[in-house]
Amino acid sequence: MASSIQQLYRQVTGDVLSSKDADYDQIRRGWDLTIDHYPKVILVPHDAADIAAGVRFAHESGLAVAVQSTGHGMLYPADDNLLIVTSRMTSIQVDAEARTALVEAGTTWQQVLDTATPHSLAPLLGSSPHVGVVGYMLGGGIGWLARRYGFGSDSLRQIDIVTADGVLRHASPSENSELFWGLRGGGGNFGVVVAMEFDLYPVPALYGGSLVYPEQTAGEALRFYRDWIRTVPDELTSSIAIVSFPSLPQVPEAFRGKTLVLVVAAFAGPAVEGEPWMRPWLDWQAPIDNSLREMPFSEIGTITNDPVDPVAEYGSSDMFDDLSDDAIDAIVRLATDSASPLTLNVLRHAGGAIAGAPADASAIGNRDASLYLLIGGAVPDSAALATVKAYIQRYRAALQPYVRGGVWMNFMNGNGDGARERVTEAYLPEAQGRLAALKAKYDPDNMFRFSYQLTGLGTQEGSTVGEGRVKPSA
Ligand SMILES: Cc1cc2nc3c(=O)[nH]c(=O)nc-3n(C[C@H](O)[C@H](O)[C@H](O)COP(=O)(O)OP(=O)(O)OC[C@H]3O[C@@H](n4cnc5c(N)ncnc54)[C@H](O)[C@@H]3O)c2cc1C
């Protein structure tokens, strides 16, 4: 092995590290602190040729390959295998006339915002600009423009990828089109993405922010939210959250140590068009805090101010077709229980352009879900992890009569067990067969095994897709 590592070192222009190197600890760590992995070899590639050399090296050495950009979405540790860290491949080209961006594998959404928004163009990023473009897109990608323009991956035009045989391939609607279909939702299963090109949209400004209400209003607020989202246009993407804020100095004093209800929204347009849609909330009840404002698209990250520094969190997700009063009561009871270790209980509104595309437009399933729930808590140590896991299991079991089944894999980050158990819920039955066939074709030895488990999909008995009920595992 030592000699082949030396050989890899000579073949690439990027860096090759083992545990003996000073930078090893810093580079192996990603944003999600629950994944503390010790790869045998780390490759920090400079270009596609380096990636291809790394994949061939792994093949010859019998190593599996994990890919890390920012480390926001890792599911399993890459212990004793090859970790390819793409964070130095960040070149980006925006074509303002064609309204496209072409980015390398390690680019973050912040870098796309910095380059695209001076042209009044917006990408389909999610809540955090610090997430990596490629990992987000491979999992589908759903953000504040989702109801207007669809999944982030719906905006993809072409992808370059090094597959398990070490070959650089091009995937687009006209070339390797089946691979292109599978890459939009199938995760990092088919190889190492080198670059992606996607559409940008003419959204120079947003009207967005949050309205904050006291914990006691939670039941009434969720009912109001359920009725209100039936009236709003596709330009408006929103969520309602029950959040338990920690008593930390960085939390605004008015929120510190409190459980509060947040209505968070983004309207894809100026205040004059967005404000009327939010007015029903102000008429309903005066909020404790109101941060709604018109903002340049470049400030989209301020809508939720997701944590930038690494955290250890564990979470899960569910989906609803509609919210009955009983479902709302169950959510409020679980979210506001004084014994709850969860910090976040978020219901996000889907539909719009997500549901408007054909069900088989890409690999990603559940386009017809109306609402999705994200729940999670901080897990600084193994005792906290056990407590949060157990609570989430109880939570999901209590919601079982109301959920429709289904999950989007981007929301299983940090929850490898759940991702393994629930992968069949993420894809339609026909898509499962197509994904398994793609996996067998492009990665027959499951070299890329640190993403969602697609091998053998579509052949298992008891698929839960479309059956409307999920097993209450976290
Ligand atoms: C704070 C936070 C906010 C989020 N908000 C949203 C949101 O609003 N909407 C949404 O849809 N998702 C959201 N996510 C989920 C996020 O999109 C996924 O976790 C995504 O996988 C992160 O991608 P990454 O590249 O940053 O992370 P990484 O951990 O670096 O990568 C995640 C996985 O993507 C794959 N991957 C990454 N790069 C490559 C590559 N070059 N080739 C092949 N495979 C690759 C690998 O399987 C890797 O394990 C959020 C996550 C966090 C932590």
Image (tube, rainbow, N blue to C red):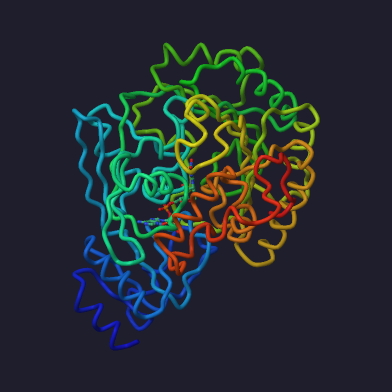
Relative depth, front residue between 13 and 215: 13
Residue at 25 percent across and 43 percent down: it is 102
Q: In this view, does 66 lie above or below 339?
A: below
Q: Please identify the quadrant where the N terminus is shown.
A: bottom left
Q: Position of residue 440 (x, y in %)?
A: 46, 61
Q: Position of residue 297 (x, y in %)?
A: 35, 29
59 displayed left or right of 419? left
Q: Is residue 359 above or below residue 203?
A: below
Relative depth, front residue between 451 and 474: 451
257 displayed left or right of 333? left
Number of dots carrying numbers: 0
Picture quadrant where residue 124 is located? top left
Picture quadrant where residue 298 is located? top left
Relative depth, front residue between 125 and 295: 125
Relative depth, front residue between 186 and 41: 186
Q: Please identify the quadrant where the C terminus is shown.
A: bottom right
Q: Position of residue 134 (x, y in %)?
A: 37, 50
